[in-house]
Image (spheres, grey):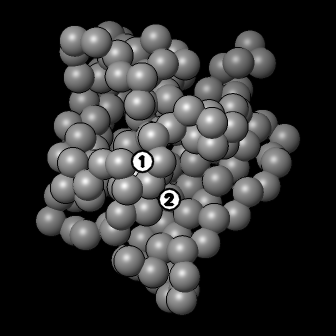
Amino acid sequence: MKNLILIAAILFIVFSCGTNKKTATITKDAAQVGDTITLSSDDSDYEILIIEPGFNAWLASRARPKGFHSQSFLENKNIFYVTQWNTRVMQPQRYNATLYEMQIDYRSNIDYGYDVNYQLYNYFVYFQNRYKQNLLGGRIPTN
């Protein structure tokens, strides 16, 4: 039951307008339910908030470094991941509703910047590995 509460907090991914920061900022706060990472970028006026136990440590130790993938690669993968994610949110009778609670508003015609795309892509890789989910079919990515 404790895991269900933690999983409910996982899916709080937010894109919001209005940040005017000079540099990319990552804030890490230890929340009671796990790691909280907020990333905002001067590349865009968007930010992403991920609440997930263990994600911060995984990102630092296992994720490919920034610059390994191009922004267009990350954007293309994120479009497919978000589409499949939102499909699963809309089918709670077929997919675990505690894993897929909220839709993600990700639009292909918006430039979210490299940092936000990097963070979102790596969250999808982490999520698939941790919860043994396969959003795109085939082999579950390692990163």
Task: Name the residue carrying label 2.
Answer: 48
* Callout 1: SS: helix
Relative to residue 104, is residue 137 depicted above or below? above
Please identify the quarter of the rendering in which residue 23 is found. bottom right
Query: For this rendering, which residue is in front, 52 or 54?
Result: 54
User: Image point 58% across, 41% down: which residue?
Assistant: 59
- Residue 84 locus on image (x, y percent): 25, 30
Q: Quadrant of the C terminus?
A: top left
- Residue 20 locus on image (x, y percent): 50, 88
Residue 103 lies left or right of residue 107; in this view the side is right
Task: Name the residue carrying label 1.
Answer: 120
For residue 4, the mark is none
User: How many neighbours does mark 1 have within 10 angstroms: few (below 14), some (14-19), or many (20 or more)?
Assistant: many
Please identify the quarter of the rendering in which residue 8 is found. top right
Mark 2 to mark 1: distance in Å?
8 Å
Residue 91 lies left or right of residue 19; in this view the side is left
Relative to residue 55, is residue 104 depicted above or below? below
Please identify the quarter of the rendering in which residue 117 is found. bottom left
Asked whether the beta carbons under mark 2 and mark 1 sit within 8 Å of each other, the answer is yes
Q: Amino acid at mark 1?
A: Leu
